[in-house]
Amino acid sequence: MRQRDDQRWKDEAPLRAMEKHLATALKALEGLDTARVKRPDELTTYRMGFVQLEYQKVLESSTIITQATVDRYPAVPWQRLHRLRQRWVHGYFSVKAQEVYDEVTQQGPHLLRAIRATLRAYRAEGLTSP
């Protein structure tokens, strides 16, 4: 096995956290029919606070990935995640439930595939933990 660069090896934990929290957020939205929801604020009754917190964990984890990994795996939209994190964290109470729903349902599946592809590449390169 190729000798690992310690910093890149440390990126595995936040990548796995991103995968876990994103999958949890997507699962929490399964079966939610927004067409049945009469008012946008009703979305909050459908676990949107939980979903937002799970997605924010994805966003937070993305900020501690090293620049080497960001450069090496551009399929993950790192800069977009960083910008979204800034907006959601600093304006937590102003983020609308519909915005959270749209972000997670529209971008989440693509992001999950990109994260999983990155983790597969890590494994193939021997950069994951033993």
Image (cartoon, grey):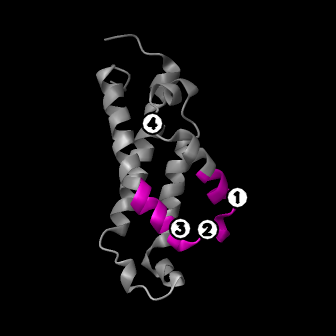
* Circle 4 or circle 1, nearest the eye: 1
The 10 Å Cα crowd at callout 2, few under 14, some 14 to 19, many 20 or more, is: some
Q: Which mark is residue 99?
A: 3
Could you say where residue 56 lies in the image, as x and y percent from the top left? Answer: 54, 55
The residue type indicated by label 3 comes to Glu
The 10 Å Cα crowd at callout 1, few under 14, some 14 to 19, many 20 or more, is: few
What is the CA distance from the residue labelled 4 to the residue labelled 2?
28 Å
* 4 and 1 marks in contact (CB < 8 Å): no
Q: Which residue is mark 2?
A: 95
57 with respect to 110 (left or right): right
Say above or below: 107 vs 62.
below
What is the CA distance from the residue labelled 3 to the residue labelled 1?
15 Å
* Circle 3 or circle 1, nearest the eye: 3
The residue type indicated by label 1 comes to His
What is the CA distance from the residue labelled 4 to the residue labelled 1?
25 Å
Q: Which residue is mark 4?
A: 13
What is the CA distance from the residue labelled 2 to the residue labelled 3?
7 Å
The structure residue drawn at horizontal position 37% and vertical position 68%, both measured from the top left corner, is 29
Depth check: 85 or 127 in front?
85
Say above or below: 50 vs 9.
below
Depth check: 22 or 34 in front?
34
Question: What SS does tag 3 mark?
Answer: helix
